[in-house]
Amino acid sequence: MTKWNVYVTNEIPQPALDMLAEHCDLEVNREGKPLLKSTFLQKIQGRDAVLCLLTDQIDAEVLRAANQAKIFANYAVGYNNIDIPAATAHGIMISNTPGVLTDTTAEMAWALLFSVARRVVESDNYTRMGKYEGWGPMLFLGQDIFNKTVGIIGPGRIGLSFAKRAKAFDMKVLYTGNKANPQFEHETGGQYVSLAKLLQNSDYVSIHTPLLPETFHLIGEKEFKQMKNTAILINTSRGPVVDELALVKALETGEIWGAGLDVYEWEPKLAEGLSKLDNVTLCPHIASATIETRTKMGMIAAVNIIAAMKGELPPNCLNP
Ligand code: DGY
């Protein structure tokens, strides 16, 4: 079997590169940042496979330039960065990395929820800055988590993992999505409601839906008005699901109490005013960023490429 020529668009954990290198000739972009589009278009010419990231826009122009590619293996579960119909039209397979980042991402959503509800980042800054002068009865009052209601938008794998953890805090779980999900209800005791009802009744709202045309700006001005003034919004899915300018306004005016964000509408840029707010915790899209999970994601992407090289259907092919 001739070795495939594979391009990897950024550094990923070494075990995955080692696995690929056993089977393929590899070139890895080691600049630590996405390539300029013109360089990217040049780099992918003549490659049999490309291991790409969610920051790489795989559009029709890229797919045309990848004149020998059989597969683009996305190093992410989300694939809104890839024009799948165009890939299919070019006869190029697309794969993703589902499953391995489910619990890791759900844990990060909880980390954000705790951080905002208990004002962890704010009080850490305060303490570091030497402002702490002794215990105070009114110092950094936050919100309880136990016995509250959490609303989950998107009862998929990550939403389910997030919801299961809510049981440990004796929380009531509401969820919304395309339709009721009996498995989700069985495992979490969650109750299926409309989006409006979820927003009106939840103390915490966590978004776990993919970015699709129908979920773009799912949460905007109207939805913030439906939420409780004490509510906290958590987003670890994709930024454009939330109208970020409307979010800044809702946080500034006290329409909602706080937000924990790992993703942004114009990532890596933040909406004007967002970073000036105290009632937000802002993370740089790290929900899947544990050593174990990022390594597994790399291995899965490698396995998909190697399967394609052997003439097999890659296990996570999205357009077989
Ligand atoms: C994904 O996989 O889609 C996450 O956003 C990054 O791991």
Image (cartoon, helix red, strand yellow):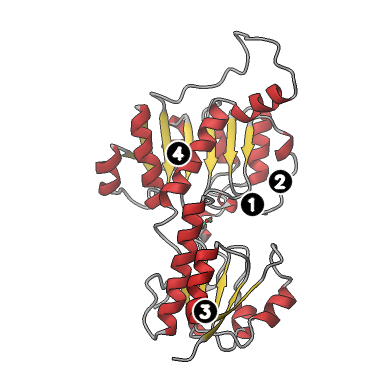
The answer to which of marks 1 and 2 sits earlier in the sequence is: 1
* Mark 4 vs 3, N-terminal side: 3
- Figure quadrant of residue 197: top left
Residue type at mark 3? Ala
The nearer-to-camera label among 4 and 2 is 2
Q: CA distance from mark 2 to mark 3?
A: 32 Å
| In contact (CB < 8 Å): disc 1 and disc 4 | no
Mark 1 or 4, which is nearer the eye?
1
Q: Where is mark 1, residue-wise?
A: 265
Q: Residue at x 55, y 72 (%)?
A: 51
Q: Relative to residue 299, is residue 223 depicted above or below?
A: above
**C-alpha span from label 4 to label 3:** 37 Å
Secondary structure of residue under mark 4: helix
Q: Cβ of disc 4 within 8 Å of ligand 1?
A: no
Mark 2 lies on residue: 271
Residue annotated with mark 3: 87
Q: Amino acid at mark 2?
A: Ala
The residue wearing badge 4 is 196
